[in-house]
Amino acid sequence: MTNNIRPASMERITTPALAQAFIDEQVAAVRAQVGDKKVLLALSGGVDSSVVAALLIKAIGRQLVCVHVNHGLMRKGESEQVIEVFGKELDANLIYVDATDRFLDLLAGVAEPERKRKIIGGEFIKVFDEEAAKLEGISFLAQGTIYPDILESDGVKAHHNVGGLPEDMQMELVEPVKLLYKDEVRVVGEALGLPHAMVYRQPFPGPGLGVRCLGAITRDRLHALREADAILRAEFDNCGLAEKVWQYFIAVPDMKSVGVRDGKRYEGWPAIIRAVNTTDAMTATIEEIPYAVLHKITNRITAEVDGINRVLLDLTPKPIGTIEWE
Ligand code: XMP
């Protein structure tokens, strides 16, 4: 598998047995490519980079150096899961960088969405570069490129790759899942023993909660967003919607409305629920959420999350609304 074209003869990986055969083949290929040299990987905790990490750990163990940059815009518990699964369970050579303050300081006062994206993408590269410069003897860079990335690399989604790495990084690439479709990456991930929730994680944009904490990000509103989003996810898990809905999240705009709590005026932000189904993210439809579930989510968010006093539901399909608010 040296080029970027999937051979017509390549069977779709749909079963654990096919996944195992793929893993065996890639373990041998990676060992042959890398020898006793070291490989660097930016491990975001997303499906693709996690599967690549698990595959490379199987092939070359601690010759793989994983760097997880926490930009402070992760969902609740995500960086902790990366540390738990890779640092502890898989005994990976994991460097964890908590760069929250760097990102949030740079983003302070910046309201324009594309500028926010550029700042987050640019700072990510800087932090990763700095970590790479501290390491010695790294010869390869591993990436979680998958086949749709190759097919779409000069298409409409190019601007989405804000987590991309600098082009001038002079390292040979290791891209063991570059000919796989997403569903195949997931089957391989399960065969590698990664947690189901990690392998079936819904898509999460590179700039993370940064594009859901609308307008200029503040720490208190970001905290409220993260907590509200965690409640939404927990309740979707409880009622089986998590398995059914393609992407669901909370957005919190930079505005307040008047409310009342404990007999006193209580100004707070609204939490906006967005839950969409799609196959390719180019168009999306709205998932129908039972009212009982909506009431429960509303009650929990308004009772448990400081600063939120209303819960709204976004019923807008794509088009006309994009999936994200920014
Ligand atoms: P939109 O909002 O364009 O989103 O309808 C389509 C899909 O792309 C994700 N998305 C992003 N992913 N960086 C990413 O890595 C981004 O800047 C970004 N913006 C949107 C979005 O979550 C949805 O799945």
Image (tube, grey):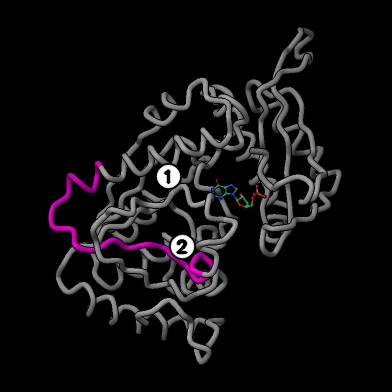
Q: Which residue, given by chain and number where applicable, does mark 2 sit on?
A: 48
Image position, residue 144 (x, y; %) = 41, 63
Image position, residue 126 (x, y; %) = 32, 40
Write down the region rendered in magenta: 130-150
Residue in view at x 58 percent, y 54 percent:
203
The mark lying in front, picked from 1 and 2, is 2
Mark 1: few/some/many CA within 10 Å (<14, 14-19, 20+)? many
Q: Residue furthest front?
A: 154
Residue in view at x 72 percent, y 14 percent:
267
Which quadrant of the view contains residue 240? Answer: bottom right
Could you tell me which quadrant the N terminus lies in?
bottom left
Under 8 Å from ligand 1: the CB of mark 1? no
- How many numbered badges does the structure rendering display? 2
Q: Is residue 128 above or below residue 58?
A: above
Residue 306 lies left or right of residue 317; in this view the side is left
Mark 1–mark 2 contact, CB under 8 Å?
no
Image position, residue 278 (x, y; %) = 72, 60
Mark 2: few/some/many CA within 10 Å (<14, 14-19, 20+)? many
Q: CA distance from mark 1 to mark 2?
A: 16 Å
Residue in view at x 76 percent, y 14 percent:
261
Viewer-nearest residue: 235 or 122: 122
Residue 194 numbered tag: none
**Magenta residue check for 205:** no
Residue in view at x 60 percent, y 28 percent:
224
Could you tell me which quadrant the C terminus lies in?
top right
Kindly state the secondary structure of the residue where label 2 is placed. helix
**Magenta residue check for 148:** yes
Q: Which residue, given by chain and number where applicable, does mark 1 sit on?
A: 79
Of labels 1 and 2, earlier in sequence is 2
